Image: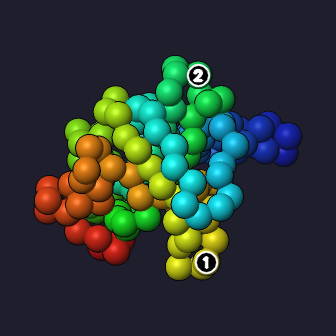
Amino acid sequence: MSRRSLLLAGMLIFFRSVAPAYADPCKAPLPAQPGVRFSGKVQYVGDGDGLCVGKTADPSEWVEVRLADFDASELHQAAGAAAKAALERIALHRQVTCTTERGRSGRVVSFDRVIARCRIGSTSIGDLLRQEGLAEGGI
């Protein structure tokens, strides 16, 4: 085999083994001030503490939220998939009202999400997740 063939074969093996990265579909501009209220249905759940809220089925109107009052395990950690499944059971397609807050860094926007406390009725989603017995702190 030529070097070129070996290189192409190696690249093919590498790219076939790489898992696709799925970006959250939420595309609406994020509120940048604390205390901003917005509402809609939970249209998408990305992980155990990340979701998209929107009034329509158009992802360009969905606000991406990082829950202010619950720190779920990451998806690659042991409890991550269970945290995402719990958030989907609790909130997906439900009407929520969210209020932006400052995070530990003092910012309202963290990476590509707004930090907000979201409620279903009068109960915060963070409290509902704790009631499900989910561990916090990325454990």
| Amino acid type, callout 2 | Asp
Element at badge 2? loop
Look at the numbered disc 1 and give the secondary structure of its residue: loop
Q: Is residue 95 above or below residue 133?
A: above
Which residue has dot 2 on it?
58
Residue sitting at x 77%, y 38%: 8
> In front: 134, or 124?
124
Q: Are marks 2 and 1 in contact (CB under 8 Å)?
A: no
**Whether residue 73 is visible:** no
Closer to the N terminus: mark 2 or mark 1?
2
Q: Residue at 61%, 78% (x, y): give it.
A: 106
Q: Which residue is mark 1?
A: 106
- Mark 1 crowdedness (10 Å alpha carbons): few <14, some 14-19, many ≥20: few
Q: Is residue 103 left or right of residue 96?
A: right
Where in the figure is residue 65, as x and y percent of width and height? 51, 51
Q: Quadrant of the N terminus?
A: top right
